[in-house]
Image (cartoon, coloured by chain):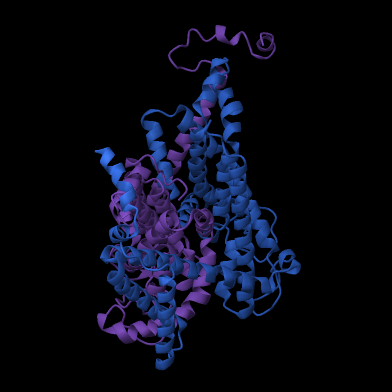
């Protein structure tokens, strides 16, 4: 036992670091390493700042030439003479499709999360969690392809049905019998896409409910639903909210699934089932190929608005999560 | 007091009083029975009304099931139990509702994609073909995706690793807080915004043409925060005793990190990196803006337009002919397989090399 340290451990090391007691690194290796790692942290911040700065700069170029009101105009004609473009229709389409997605996805996600965390047997729960993880990894273009070629024809019938029985609500009134390439379908597809995202985070939160809370409720004779209502949901409320906002952030910025499904137009229509409308990301993807440099700047201007929107939503979600350090939602 | 309780126990063990204490319970087969009855009823109604859609049948069956369960359970077991059963069936319905579209997605992709997927499809490009010609393949797109993802990984992983090390090992104070927050926010940046950023700098400001490298830069932005987050989580799992033992032996901190901390967490870090790769491999939007796509094989990511798998799917879909749809499904299947294999291997590694946090 006594012979081992003399051979392998570096004996002179303990002698040197006396002058540097205050946690400051004096070894050159440490200095370089700290510099590198702090440098990459700062680099990330710089990238964030650069994103904001460059997008703002190009957007400024575009907006200063714009003859129409950028926020309220219902057209997109940056290459016209004079250039006129506005984001009103994009704001409308983005928000409406995301809201539809949230209305559908949040309750179902909470249900699935409860199913995985509290209803499924333990042997089933592991593989199910795994499956949801895998589904979150399916590329959005595949969802888009499926949405356009499978979901749209399928929803044609449902649209007619909705029009027939709920047409009186105005929003479900459908003029004409075009295919279901509308904001409603987009909302449903976005819901399918963000389901795994919301479920993942919510499930993580539900699994962290203190066992004692649940056992206390059970000991008082509560049924399983009462346990969930009295101990699981109150504990997980902030988790559900932040998970939903992460999902919302995903839905707001989704490009390909919307671009494949929607048949866009810049005519405003309050009827969800009529083809038309558009979202920020979809509009960028669709208009990019025909855009000259100024047209690109105009698209960047709309991208800046999208950037700010997702920034606010995600920032709020992260702040809510940060209040509870135990679960981070890191894998969302 | 306790004596009296124990004394009374044998007497309550007799049958009649014990049964009066317990609630009346429904037999175990009751839910199955109600389900069968509601399906039968719904089918009868559906056939009588002549509805084509099986979904309508299913919905009516579900309504019958829920109301039937509620009414019967309230009558037999009481309303609290009835609510519990309703909640159970709602949770089950949620699960089934979610599984249906996802199963349809997986099934359609496999079924449509496997029709065209073969050696020829994997080893040929689209050179000289138009939307009305059958044949063609995705070789050029696979090359493009692999190169772009490789470049993005080469840039993003070192930066991500170092940032995570900074946050876990050195980070104190406001800088670390800011980095943590903005890394979190950065994970939520829409991929198209990352593409627009590179467009506004690399292409519009520095006047470079479209290339695989430009796309890779955008993918880097999407990948860095994911790597940081997963690595950070893994480094936090490394027991402090290991660090302290190493430092106590006089090993410098940077060597402790390189030789003790990182090797301990390497399994989890690899998993995180692979998941991040899987995520960016499926990104279409930045590639659409910056790489533009091509029908030809271009092995040089630094010069000229390139193809990529997700972009190929999109462009073939947009052509809108039966042949191009076939190719789109084929490429989608390859993409899904690629992503799934990465995911499965990554999780396998995670399980195999999980850091031993317990004693």
Residue at figure coordinates x 65%, y 61% from the top left: B141
**Which residue is most to the left?**
B1
Residue at figure coordinates x 48%, y 7% from the top left: A19
Question: Which chain is represented by purple in the image?
Answer: A
Residue at figure coordinates x 68%, y 65% from the top left: B138
Tally the numbered discs.
0
Question: Which chain is represented by blue in the image?
Answer: B
Percent position of residue A292, x then y: 48, 63
Residue at figure coordinates x 31%, y 42% from the top left: B6
Q: Is residue B55 left or right of residue A227?
A: right
Percent position of residue A158, x then y: 40, 81
Q: Is residue A250 visible?
A: no
Q: Is residue A44 visible?
A: yes
Percent position of residue A10, x then y: 63, 12
The one nearer the camera, B189 or B206, is: B189
Task: Give above or below for A330 relative to A114.
Answer: above
Q: Is residue B203 left or right of residue A245?
A: right
Q: Is residue A119 left or right of residue A28?
A: left
Q: Quadrant of residue B19?
A: bottom left
Task: Give above or below for B15 relative to B330.
Answer: above
Indicate the quadrant containing the N terminus of chain A: top left, top right, bottom left or bottom right: top right
Percent position of residue B142, x then y: 67, 59
């Amino acid at each position: 036992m006594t012979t081992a340290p003399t051979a392998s451990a570096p004996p002179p090391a303990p002698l040197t670091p006396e002058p540097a007691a205050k946690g400051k690194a004096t070894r050159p290796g440490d200095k370089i390493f700290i510099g590198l790692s702090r440098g990459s942290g700062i680099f990330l911040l710089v990238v964030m700042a650069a994103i904001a700065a460059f997008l703002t700069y190009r957007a400024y170029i575009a907006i200063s030439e714009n003859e129409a009101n950028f926020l309220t105009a219902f057209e997109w004609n940056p290459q016209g003479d004079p250039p006129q473009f506005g984001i009103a229709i994009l704001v409308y389409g983005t928000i409406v499709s995301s809201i539809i997605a949230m209305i559908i996805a949040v309750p179902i996600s909470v249900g699935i999360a409860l199913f995985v965390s509290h209803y499924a047997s333990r042997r089933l729960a592991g593989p199910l969690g795994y499956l949801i993880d895998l589904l979150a990894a399916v590329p959005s273009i595949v969802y888009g392809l499926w949405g356009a070629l499978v979901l749209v024809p399928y929803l044609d019938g449902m649209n007619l049905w909705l029009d027939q029985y709920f047409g009186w609500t105005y929003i479900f009134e459908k003029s004409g019998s075009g295919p279901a390439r509308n904001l409603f379908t987009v909302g449903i597809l976005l819901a399918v896409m963000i389901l795994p995202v919301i479920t993942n985070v919510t499930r993580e939160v539900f699994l962290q409910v203190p066992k004692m809370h649940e056992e206390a409720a059970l000991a008082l004779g509560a049924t399983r639903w009462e346990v969930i209502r009295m101990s699981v949901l109150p504990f997980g409320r902030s988790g559900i909210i932040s998970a939903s906002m992460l999902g919302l952030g995903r839905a707001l910025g989704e490009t390909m699934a919307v671009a494949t499904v929607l048949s866009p137009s810049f005519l405003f229509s309050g009827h969800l089932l009529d083809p038309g409308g558009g979202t920020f990301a979809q509009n960028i993807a669709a208009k990019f190929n025909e855009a000259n440099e100024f047209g690109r700047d105009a698209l960047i201007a709309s991208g800046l608005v999208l950037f700010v929107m997702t920034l606010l939503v995600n920032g709020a979600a992260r702040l809510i999560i940060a209040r509870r350090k135990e679960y981070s939602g890191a894998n969302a | 007091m306790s004596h009296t309780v124990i004394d009374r126990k044998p007497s309550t063990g007799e049958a009649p009083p014990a049964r009066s204490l317990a609630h009346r319970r429904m037999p175990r087969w009751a839910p199955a029975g109600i389900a069968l009855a509601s399906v039968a009823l719904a089918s009868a109604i559906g056939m009588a009304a002549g509805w084509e859609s099986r979904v309508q049948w299913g919905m009516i069956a579900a309504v019958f099931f829920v109301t039937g369960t509620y009414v019967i359970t309230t009558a037999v077991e009481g309303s609290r139990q009835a609510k519990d059963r309703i909640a159970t069936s709602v949770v089950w319905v949620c699960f089934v509702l979610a599984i249906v579209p996802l199963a349809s997605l997986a099934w359609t992709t496999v079924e449509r994609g496997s029709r065209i997927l073969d050696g020829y499809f994997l080893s040929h490009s689209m050179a000289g073909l138009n939307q009305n010609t059958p044949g063609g393949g995705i070789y050029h797109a696979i090359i493009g995706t692999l190169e772009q993802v490789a470049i993005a990984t080469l840039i993003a992983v070192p930066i991500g690793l170092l940032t995570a090390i900074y946050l876990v090992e050195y980070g104190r104070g406001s800088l670390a807080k800011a980095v943590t927050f903005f890394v979190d926010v950065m994970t939520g940046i829409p991929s198209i915004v990352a593409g627009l950023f590179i467009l506004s700098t690399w292409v519009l400001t520095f006047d470079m043409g479209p290339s695989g490298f430009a796309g890779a830069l955008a993918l880097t932005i999407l990948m860095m925060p994911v790597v940081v987050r997963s690595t950070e989580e893994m480094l936090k799992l490394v027991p402090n005793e290991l660090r302290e033992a190493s430092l106590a032996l006089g090993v410098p901190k940077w060597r402790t990190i390189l030789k003790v901390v990182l090797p301990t967490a390497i399994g989890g870090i690899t998993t995180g990196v692979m998941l991040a790769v899987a995520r960016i491999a499926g990104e279409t939007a930045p590639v659409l803006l910056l790489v533009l796509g091509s029908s030809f094989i271009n092995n040089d990511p630094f010069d000229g337009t390139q193809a990529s798998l997700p972009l190929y799917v999109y462009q073939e879909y947009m052509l809108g002919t039966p042949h191009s749809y076939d190719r789109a499904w084929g490429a989608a299947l390859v993409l899904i397989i690629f992503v799934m294999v990465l995911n499965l291997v990554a999780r396998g590694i995670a399980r195999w090399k999980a850091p031993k946090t317990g004693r």
